[in-house]
Each structure stands twice: as structure tokens, then as C-alpha cells.
Image: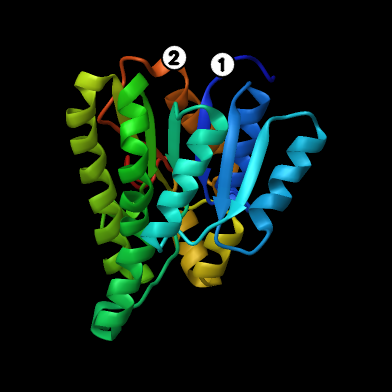
Amino acid sequence: MPSDRLDGKSVLITGTAGGQGAAAQRLFAEHGARVAGCDVQQGAAEASAAELQDEGHDVQGSTVDLGDPDAARGWVESSAAALGGIDVLYNNAAGFGFAPFDQMDLELWRHVMRVELDIVFHTTSPAWRFLCGGGGSVINTASYSALRGIEPLGAVAHAAAKGGVIAMTRTLATEGAKHGVRANSISPGFVSSPATDAAVDDDARAWQLSKHLIQRPGECIDVAYCALYLASDESAWVTGQNFSVDGGVTAGFR
């Protein structure tokens, strides 16, 4: 049930047009946060924010290409000004690109790095001074692909980028500790969402589900509840960790 777990917190969430970002935006708002969301799809973040505004929540949305560092910085700084600071930065947004290694070219490799790793830097860099000024929480989205090799998915670039997200998160935790900044990452397993459904075919979907100990695809809310904990003061002594929300796929096979 909605509560005040994030009452008064100013939160930035990327990728709020749908899927995990939209689920987190709603959950965070219902728990008292003031939220600024963004998405690369024209008008989509504004539309998802408007639904929550109509319900009385303090949510705003913007169309932003986070692959453009200047656009990302502009969104972070304008959102911080509108919200009066930043308490939580949730780097949820990501693109994708999959191909077997013998079919992967440099263009695809660089695209994946841009939309899965660079964009985390593009938002966290300008947000850092706001977070360090008052303490806060950085939440980054990684993937179980960073934790184990998955041959059928053609995920070399994806795995490398998400492994970089986890490593970046741990280093942010070490540098942010003296400023009261915590940094953690979440590694989802196969979650059914518009993005993941578009990225994998039926065979890859069935293969992934067959490896989960809990035999169902994840739901966006499963990940959002983990993010809610990391955004809240309940996790005040938790930093530098990667949380696997994956139906048990990284624990072992049945």
C-alpha cells in the first residue's frame, strides 16, 4: 500500500515512458517522492507523468536523448532546479543491441556502449554535485548478463556494458561515501516489458524462462520494489552492492 517511504525526496528517473521506469515512477510517487522523469520517445515521458499528475502526484516528464551529454546535463540541472535538489538518481534507461560475436561490428559495439554505459555517465556526472551536497542514493540498472555468459542471446556488448555499470557503481560508492552518497545497482533477469519483448525472439524468451528458478518472467514492479528500497532511508547502510532480481537465474539451474 502507498506510504511515506520517500516522503519529501526529490527523485530523477530515466526511461519513464513505460516498463520498469514507468513502474518505478508510479511507485515512487505513491510513496511520497517528487519525481522528474525522462525518455527518448517524443512526448512519452510527459504522457506518463500526466497520468500521475491527474491523480495528484508531483511528477514531471521530459523528452531527452540521454546519449547527448549536453541534453542529459540540461535535463539533470533543470530537474534539480525544479525539485530543489536531487536525493535519488535512478539510471533506469537503456537501449540495446544484440548479435553473435562473429557478426558484431564496431558500429554496433559502440552503439551499445553509448546507450547502455555512456548514458549512465551522462546523467550521473552532472547530478554528482547535487548528490554530494546533501547525500543521496544512486541506483543503476545492470543485468544478469553481466554476471554470467548467455550464449543464445548474442550479448557480448550488452554484457560488457552492464558489467561496466556494476563496476562504475562500486567505485561511485567508494568515492561518494564521505559525502553521504550511496550507490547500488540492480541486475534484473528476464523481465517482460516493451523493451525486452522487442529485443528477444520467442526462442530466446523460452530459453531464458527455462533457467529461472521461479518459472515466470519478471514483472516491472518486481524491479521497482527493489529500487524503492534502495531509494529509501531503509537502505541507509547499504552501498556498493549489486542486487539480482532475477527469479533465481544466477543462483543456479534446476
Which residue matches tag 1?
A: 5
Taking 53 as reference, is 160 left or right?
Answer: left
Q: Name the foreground residue: 125 vs 39.
A: 125
> What residue sits 25% from the left and 21% below the top?
179
User: In the figure, 45 relative to 114: above or below?
Assistant: above
- From the top left corner, tell me how far across and down residue 92 is, in percent: 46, 47
Left or right of 94, for residue 157: left
Colour treatment of the image: rainbow
SS of the residue at dot 1?
Answer: loop
Gap between marks 2 and 1 measured at Cα: 8 Å
Closer to us: 201 or 168: 168
Q: Visible in this render: residue 145? A: yes
Instruction: Count neighbours of disc 1 (C-alpha within 10 A) and say few if under 14, some if 14 to 19, many if 20 or more.
Output: some
| Residue nearest the viewer, comparing 62 with 7 | 62
Q: Are marks 2 and 1 in contact (CB under 8 Å)?
A: yes
Q: Where does residue 216 sit, x and y in percent of width and height?
A: 56, 47
Can residue 185 be seen here? no
Q: Residue at horizontal 44%, vertical 14%?
A: 234
Image-based side of 193 in relation to 69, left or right: right
Using a 10 Å C-alpha cutoff, classify the residue at mark 2 as few (fewer than 14 neighbours), some (14 to 19) or many (20 or more): few
Q: Is residue 76 above or below residue 149?
A: above
Placement of the N terminus among the 4 image quadrants? top right
Residue at horizontal 42%, vertical 66%?
96
Q: In the rendered structure, which disc, 2 or 1, sits on the residue that comes first in sequence? A: 1
Is residue 30 rendered to the left or right of residue 242? right
Query: Horizontal and vertical percent for residue 10?
Result: 52, 27
Residue 31: quadrant of the picture:
top right
Dot 2 lies on which element? helix
Instruction: Give coordinates of residue 87: x percent, y percent.
Output: 44, 26
Residue kind at label 2, given as amino acid type = Glu
Q: Which residue is mark 2?
A: 234
Residue shown at the point (27%, 83%) measured from the top left: 105
